[in-house]
Amino acid sequence: MPPRCRSAPQSGPRLAARLARAVGIVLVALLALPYGLAVLYRVGHPVSTLMLARWASGARVSRQWVGLDAVAPVMVRTVIAAEDARFCSHHGIDWEALSGAIEDAQDGEVSGGGSTITQQTVKNLFLWPGRSVLRKALELPLSLWLDLVLPKRRILEIYLNLAEWGPNGQFGIEAGARHAFGRGAAGIDAREAALLAAVLPNPVTRSAARPNRVVGRRAALYMARAGQASTACLANGPEKARGRGFQSGLPLGGPIQPG
């Protein structure tokens, strides 16, 4: 009786399954990593993905971290007025603004995208610049998570220290203020704060030190809005209990003074 032919082990399918499982584990780990890092970012001086990319390419990066108490209150109010007027009332995503941005896109109109300060912080910390459906899909749940695990005050502090604020690798409000006006973020006044806010999100083509007509118009608008910016969520201790605005010693909605 002739010997039976033994079938060759099915190494190909098994290897493919193992590779697929390994790739799946790596993808899950990469997706979960930002959620873990977000919790750790309650302290420390995190950097942005854009800063990391510039370091990797050998490009210049200038950033000096400053706490929120070292930023002129007028700058804080102006950034909120310019970038996210409902920062203190939403939970990471301004659904009303996002809905409006979607409607504008469907109508073929150009809009600011409806991104909150929290969403921009998530993008700077974990994602990449530019608009895409994939980035937005990753950004939305991360923004809800960041708002859950970090205080509003900390989110704004991180945002102010990660935003690109100059044409040659100036990151953070301290580097941006020194580049534009020759002094730190604690010493800028209302007009300078508005000009700094007006160059976002493209400080490469816009200048706070030498504003063109567009930057000047935007700055004037932000100065008008800043006095009504709500900063109640940034107050600490007794100030929070009294419902007063951030460091200003004024009721919310009161007149804004130069920093």
Image (cartoon, rainbow, N blue to C red):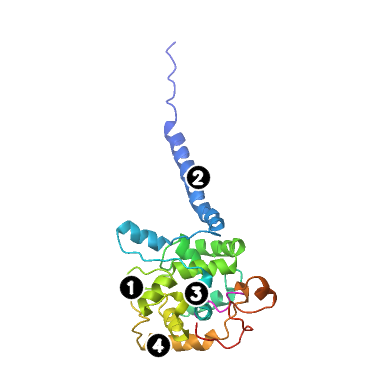
Q: Which residues are magenta?
A: 82-88
Q: Position of residue 186 (x, y in %)?
A: 47, 76
Residue type at tag 3: Val
Q: Position of 147 compared to 62: left or right? A: right
Tell me, for residue 216, which label it has, or none: 4
- Tell which circle, 1 or 4, labels the residue nearer the N-terminal end: 1
> Which residue is denoted by mark 3 in the rendering?
71
Contact? badges 3 and 2 (CB < 8 Å): no
Q: Position of residue 120 (x, y in %)?
A: 49, 69
Residue type at tag 2: Ile
Label 3 crowd (10 A; few <14 / some 14-19 / many >=20): many
Q: Secondary structure at mark 4?
A: helix
Contact? badges 4 and 3 (CB < 8 Å): no
> Which residue is denoted by mark 1 in the rendering?
167
How far apart are the two marked residues, 4 and 2, measured between alpha carbons? 50 Å
Q: Secondary structure at mark 1?
A: loop
Q: Secondary structure at mark 2?
A: helix
Q: In terms of image quadrants, where is residue 192? A: bottom left
Vertical comparison of 4 with 209: above or below: above
Vertical comparison of 5 with 218: above or below: above
Q: Nearer the viewer, mark 3 or mark 1?
A: 3
